[in-house]
Amino acid sequence: MQKNRIEVSGWLAAKPTVRYLPSGTPVASARLGETYSYTSQGKAEQHTNWHSLSFYGDLASVAATFDKGAHLFVEGSMEQRQFTPADGTKRTIWELIVHSFHLIGDPRSKAATRPPETVNASDGPAQDDWPVG
């Protein structure tokens, strides 16, 4: 049995952008940064990994309300996609297709004790609504 499940916690780099598929399904795109600390040769170091996120349908509508700095825990699957921009070079990207998320912290809220908000993709996007290179 194979499994494609990714869980990441981090902060949004910017407010998600929303576009619509020909079917009318909304898609929100965002970048999520997660930073970890480690020690190398006795010196404290930090490294940030950046993840491309895609939210579909109802998840996209909710994600569109988030601002830069929102702290999220996301669960989804990794997808590889190929495309050719206007310059003609073929590109390949990896993106995390979000299936559910928890809003851990909202930069607009001063309340540190706010309970996490959970959103799940109950019916998820139809396979034919997913972008294909």
Image: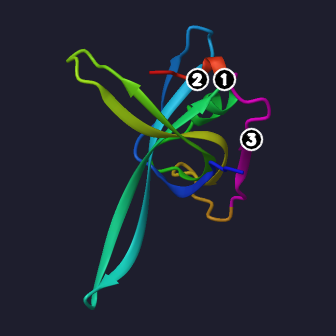
Dot 3 amino acid type: Asn
Q: Pick out the residue farthest to the bottom.
A: 42
Neighbour tally class for label 1: few under 14, some 14-19, many 20 plus, Cα within 10 Å? few
Dot 2 amino acid type: Trp
What colour-coding does the image apply?
Answer: rainbow
Which x, y percent locates residue 107? 51, 52
Q: Secondary structure at mark 2?
A: loop
Q: CA distance from mark 1 to mark 3?
A: 17 Å
Q: Which residue is mark 1?
A: 127
The quadrant in which residue 33 appears is: bottom left
Q: Which residue is mark 3?
A: 120
Neighbour tally class for label 3: few under 14, some 14-19, many 20 plus, Cα within 10 Å? some
Which residue is depicted at the point 72% across and 30% down?
124
Q: Which residue is mark 2?
A: 130
Q: Secondary structure at mark 1?
A: helix
What residue range appears in magenta?
114-126
